[in-house]
Amino acid sequence: MSSLHVITGGAGFVATNLARALLERGSRLVLIDNLSRGKRSYVDALGHSNRISFIEADVSHEGELEAALSSVSAEPDAEIWHLCANSDIPAGVNDPTVDLRDTFMVTFALLQLMRRNGWKRLHFSSTSAVYGDHGSAPLTEETFVEPISNYGAMKLASEAAIRAWCESSGGRASVFRFPNVVGVPATHGVLIDFVRKLQADSSVLPVLGDGTQRKAYLHVSDLVEAMLFIRQRDLAGYQLFNIGPRDEGITVREIAELVCQRVAPEARLSFGAEGRGWVGDVPRFRYDVSKLAKLGWSSAQSSLETIRMAIDQIAMQEGVGAP
């Protein structure tokens, strides 16, 4: 591992799991976050190591970002993990400036700073949302991209900006297209939403859409393992990978039933009429992860196994006792 790793969105769900893994490997870390979704307590839970520091700052503001990282600007081998973005897709539908600011402009500001500091190594959390809605067709890294949400569009714009940065600066970038990622500390997503709804009313669980939506799920521990595996391959130039399980996913109905079994077994399910949860939702997608498998990594867990594990973890996080 390099001497220093900078993680944007460093107080968030994926970032704190990544930070723990990097600390276990002996790395020094700088975590930067505006705390809009992440929590300082997540960082504190990593331990008060002299190898980790936290900075609260707005990454989308170039001046604020540069000031926040001025103490490490002279370290030429700093490695950047760019994980911050707006993760609330419906919020971006209601107000497109949210994704422009919190998804694309954070990437633009970071790339500008990397140019000035001469930093050459970047890892970026992208998303399956860049593909758009291709139905049940398998999605490879070569599939035509046509996002249907502002979130997906700004992630795709970020990918393009990173590709251009690689060309102009001679930098190296690993772009990870995430599936749905679950685990703890959970801040948002279908599982924590369902758990909290049942805590508020244990008699009924309202479900967005008709429950037929089918998606692949990966546990955050597997995601971090995959990202570090790719990083350790030390690949040159611009590299793009789908990360996910090898199965075709699990339906929202199945997820709702499993959450009810864990949290409120007597609850009834109340479904919507539409085949998608919200405007911009991709109701089903099927990841092709053969490129990563050929490199030597694949998830040991199916989407179903992942969901079962994460439901129990999130239920415990939210104060629901052991089953």
Image (cartoon, rainbow, N blue to C red):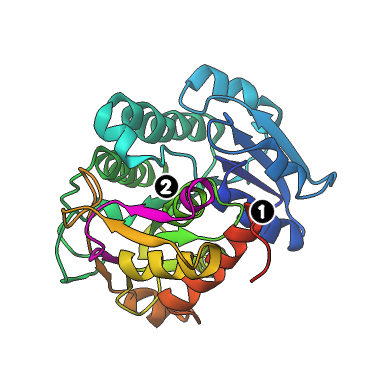
Q: Earlier in the sequence, mark 1 or mark 2?
A: 2
Residue matched to label 2: 170
Q: Is residue 32 above or below residue 5?
A: above
> Residue drawn 72% across and 40% down?
41
Instruction: List x then y, in percent, for residue 276.
Output: 20, 54
- Characterize the local packing of mark 1: few (<14), some (14-19) or many (20 or more) Cα atoms within 10 angstroms: few
Q: Disc number at residue 319?
A: 1
Q: Is residue 24 left or right of residue 315?
A: right
Q: Is residue 104 magenta?
A: no
Chain part drawn in magenta: 197-214
**Which of the 4 image quarters holds residue 243?**
bottom left
Tell whether 165 sits left or right of 141: right
Tally of marks: 2
x 16%, y 53%: residue? 274
* Nearer to me, 171 or 42: 42
- Secondary structure at badge 1 equals loop
Q: The residue tagged with tag 2: helix, strand or loop?
A: loop
Q: Residue at x 53, y 24 (%)?
A: 58
The residue under the point 64% across, 58% down is 320
